[in-house]
Image: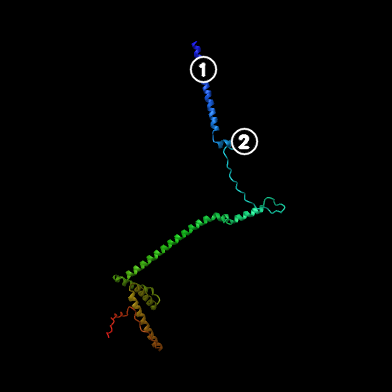
Amino acid sequence: MKSRLTGNRIEKKQDRKITSDEIDTINESNNSFKYVLSGDLYIVGRLWIEALKTALIGMNFHLIPVVEAAKVPETPQKPPSMKYTDLPLYKSPHYEYKDHLEANQKCPDANVKLLHRSLLPYVKCYRHIIARNICEAKCFVEGKYFNTCNVIRNAKKDFKQSMRDPKNLPIRQVTVAFGGTAGYILGGGGGIPRRIFFTSLGFISAGALCFPQETDDIFRNVTYTFGKVFIAVYNKWCGKEFLMRGKLACKDELPPPPPTRKPIPCPPK
């Protein structure tokens, strides 16, 4: 008896477990169905509408709305010449092509050639580079030229100052003697007048460098004396009576102006 009772109890427990599992599965299915039905109304409505549309019309079913890109309008082509009987009723290809040409003419780049448009940026770039390089080279050459001129000018000035410095009197005298000797050597082979001329030219050049004031005075006196002698010989030889104007004094040879006297006041009346 005890064994039968225990067996019945076990069977009842198993039946209870089976019924509880079935109830749980039923509840889960009901909950999932409720979750689907309780979703977003827009999505549910969209699904129903697309399903009905597919069933009735046979269109493609898209769960997510598809946005198609706009098509690029075709470029109007030049229509062939037609008779008025061949013209279409609801289209005007000639006017469409004319409007297309007018719209292209309004564009600023309508008459620009493709080769010109493609090569112009590179030509501009290389032109700017060449112009900049030429400008830099020109500035460099001008700078070097001015620097060289300044160096030569300063060296010339320093050389003149050193050759006219009273402290360098022996060097100055040797330079004048060397100039006369060089003129005497260069004037050889052409007779006495040539030798005298080149020797005088050498002395004058060296003297103008080392003794400018003394050389100027000597040159003036020599030329004045030579002129007087030449005119005297000419008058005696040709029987003329030419006269030479007297030598005018230089500004340095003139006496200084006298000091200004104080004005004498008039006696009172």
Identity of the residue drawn at 51% across and 20% down: 16
Q: Is residue 193 left or right of residue 57?
A: left
Neighbourhood count class around disc 2 (C-alpha, 10 Å): few under 14, some 14–19, many 20 upward: some
Instruction: Give SS at disc 1.
Output: helix
In the depicted structure, whether residue 32 falls above or below residue 263: above
Residue 214: x percent and y percent?
32, 76
Instruction: Confirm or deny contact between disc 1 and disc 2 (CB under 8 A).
Output: no
Residue 118, percent across and down?
55, 54
Q: Residue furthest right?
A: 85
Query: What is the residue that sits farthest to the top in this orientation?
Result: 1
**Compared to 67, does 23 lie above or below?**
above
Residue in the image at 40% along x and 64% along y: 146
Residue placed furthest toward the bottom? 239
Image-based side of 128 in relation to 146, left or right: right
| Nearer to the camera, 148 or 108 | 108
The C terminus, quarter of image: bottom left
Q: Amino acid at mark 1?
A: Lys
User: Judging from the image, what secondary structure is the residue with disc 2 in?
Assistant: helix
- Where residue 58 sits: x, y (%)? 64, 37
Give the label on residue 52, or none: 2
User: Which label belongs to residue 32?
Assistant: none
Residue 199, picture quadrant: bottom left
Q: Amino acid at mark 2?
A: Leu
**Residue annotated with mark 1:** 12
The answer to whether 68 appears left or right of 244 in the picture is right
